[in-house]
Amino acid sequence: MSDPIRLGIAGLGTVGAGVVKIVRQKAPLLEARSGRPITISAVSARNREKDRGVSLAAYDWEDDPVTLATRDDVDVFVELVGGSDGPAKAAVEAALKAGKDVVTANKALLAHHGQALAQLAEENGCVLRFEAAVAGGIPVIKALTEGLAGNDILRVMGVMNGTCNYILTRMESGGLTYDEAFAEADALGFLEADPELDVGGIDAGHKLALLASIAYGTQVAFNAVELEGIGRVTIDDIRQAADMGYKIKLLGVCRMSGRGLEQSMSPCLVPASSPLGQLDGGTNMVVIEGDQVGQIVMRGAGAGEGPTASAVMGDVMDIARGTRLTTFGAPASKLVAATPAQAATPAPYYLRMALADKPGALAKVASALGEAGVSIHRMRQYNHVDNTAPVLIVTHKTTRAALDAALAAIPATGVVQGDPVALRIEEV
Ligand code: HSE
């Protein structure tokens, strides 16, 4: 019989407990598929007494994840502690320096320290895998690193924060305000301990930065992700975008153009009839476009015990089978520093503004757009209430610079109440 592959699991929250359950309940299946027994030597978490719905009696307990990571009877260190620094980083570094392979679900850690950790893994002849860090149970890292390795990647798009998608969906389906939908997500336990990670787009931005690195052979550049959360999206935007045939999604987009690497995570409009437009609730979707394969759409649970533990086990199984991939799909020393694009690819934009009921008001707005070089594609005006009327404009493709020039000129027209809302429309 082949030697077992022995895990040390740090972090016994939802995902950690899920991994322990899979290892215990599916031992024959895992061994049959990998050719080796998968065992757990020791575990670690903050609270030893907590009931996790699974027996830990057979495993040694370590209070310190660094001690766990470097034990002689641990072959693979499974890091499920979370956080970009602190014990998670210390333990992953210690594991790699001790020659252990590492599997992690920690997007923040890799978004901030991915390049250094990938180098450390390679210097020590170790594997560092992170399927569970991006889009939960969807095997998108595997798809991009392995299945699509023969493609030039043209664009990667994704709805990769289920909490934001839940909030936006409930605003639309339930007619809830942002605050009401946020409170509902909170009551359901969807929000991260720091909700800004979800609604500020940070969690999804971490994931996008990891995908961009694999897609374009660049060092992870989270700081170059253009980030905007969903806090400014209103029920009016959702309803009126729907009226123009669109849904609003917190959408990640990355592509490499002549301008450099574009990475954005922001509320965008997508056609309501597209797969992304039809993605409701807390689900994730990643769309990858390759020059040979065309468009691939992957949809599934982005969080939760089973889906995330499934992704962790996929990485463990690869290691058990002897599959030794580089962290970001190319040797760490060959990953180039990303040159962030100074300007986004031209796109159509959706504009919403409250227009005064005065003769010539619309002409003044049209003229501000026209003088900035922004051309109107479609337009709709609704009934006046209190002497203003909501006006929606869909522009032709334009640069963000031209749009910003138009937005800067609009207040001076004196016919628009408040600031216009401008959202990018992603053609999918
Ligand atoms: N909080 C994330 C989400 C899951 O709502 O999708 C973990 O990244």
Image: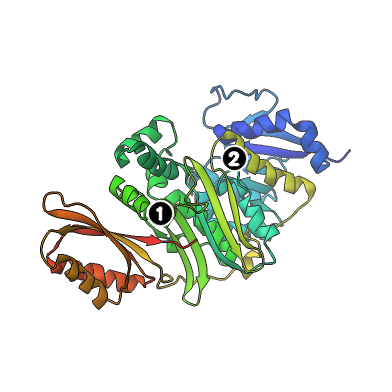
**Res 233 visible:** no
Q: Quadrant of residue 210?
A: bottom right
Q: Earlier in the sequence, mark 1 or mark 2?
A: 1
In the rendered view, does 154 fall on the left or right side of 229? right
Q: Residue 330 versus residue 345: which sits nearer the camera?
A: 345
Q: Quadrant of residue 33?
A: top right
**Res 238 visible:** yes
**What element does badge 1 sit on?**
strand
Q: Position of residue 341 (x, y in %)?
A: 44, 72
Q: Position of residue 152 (x, y in %)?
A: 63, 69
Q: Residue 271 versus residue 143: which sits nearer the camera?
A: 271
Q: Position of residue 316 (x, y in %)?
A: 70, 44
User: Is the C-beta of the residue carrying label 2 under 8 Å from the nearest atom of ligand 1?
Assistant: yes
The residue positioned 48% from the left and 45% from the top of the image is: 83
In the rendered view, does 338 fall on the left or right side of 244? right
Mark 1 neighbour class, 10 Å CA radius: few under 14, some 14 to 19, many 20 or more: many
Q: Residue 246 shows which numbered tag?
A: 1
Residue labelled with disc 2: 308
In the rendered view, does 303 fall on the left or right side of 121? left
